[in-house]
């Protein structure tokens, strides 16, 4: 029986996870390739989770300047991923929400996630899924506390 160090085990786990993600991306690239940058994708994720948010709030979330975020927002708005809406109660405040292509972007992501569940995770038993979820949630909690 070969005993691996913790580092070696973590390295193998990370390599396996990377390979899985690479295979998934390659298989579903046609659905995931939207032509936006990583930074723009981060903005979209923040807007998606918030539903309605200001440029300043996005800047805080991204730990970036409002002017840098405004440039990202302008490009996304030009390409119909997001839209700006004036707050009727406070006309100087502008909210950012998802536009037609932004909604489509997340609809495609949801489709891919459903396909991954059906094609890959369905091959695990219910107990294996429960255990995997428990372990991943525990790792997430540890990472949030430590980092």
Image (tube, rainbow, N blue to C red):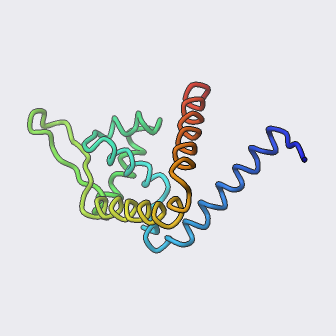
Q: Is residue 4 left or right of residue 84?
A: right
Q: Residue at x 15, y 43 (%)?
A: 86
Q: Residue at x 45, y 64 (%)?
A: 118
Give the vertical position of 32 relative to 140 (above or below). Answer: below
In the image, 35 versus 74, the foreground residue is: 35
Extreme residue in the left direction: 88
In the image, 47 versus 54, the foreground residue is: 47
Q: Quadrant of residue 68?
A: top left
Q: Quadrant of residue 32?
A: bottom left
Q: Is residue 105 left or right of residue 117?
A: left
Extreme residue in the top direction: 145
Q: Percent from the top left, x then y, of residue 19?
A: 66, 61
Q: Percent from the top left, x then y, of residue 136?
A: 57, 41
Q: Percent from the top left, x then y, of residue 62?
A: 45, 39
Q: Residue at x 76, y 51 (%)?
A: 12
Give the vertical position of 67 relative to 102 (above or below). Answer: above
Q: Residue at x 55, y 66 (%)?
A: 25
Q: How many marks?
A: 0
Q: Percent from the top left, x then y, of residue 48?
A: 32, 48
In the image, 116 versus 42, the foreground residue is: 116
Give the vertical position of 45 relative to 145 (above or below). Answer: below
């Amino acid at each position: 029986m070969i005993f691996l160090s913790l580092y070696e085990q973590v390295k193998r786990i990370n390599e396996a996870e990377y390979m899985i993600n690479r295979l998934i991306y390659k298989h579903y690239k046609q659905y995931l390739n939207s032509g936006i940058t990583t930074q723009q994708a981060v903005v979209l994720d923040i807007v998606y989770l918030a539903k309605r948010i200001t440029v300043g709030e996005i800047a805080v979330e991204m730990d970036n300047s409002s002017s840098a975020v405004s440039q990202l927002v302008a490009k996304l708005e030009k390409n119909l991923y997001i839209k700006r809406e004036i707050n009727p109660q406070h006309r100087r405040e502008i909210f950012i929400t998802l536009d037609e292509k932004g909604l489509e972007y997340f609809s495609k992501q949801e489709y891919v996630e459903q396909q991954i569940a059906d094609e890959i995770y369905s091959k695990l038993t219910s107990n294996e899924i429960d255990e995997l979820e428990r372990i991943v949630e525990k790792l997430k909690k540890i990472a949030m506390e430590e980092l």
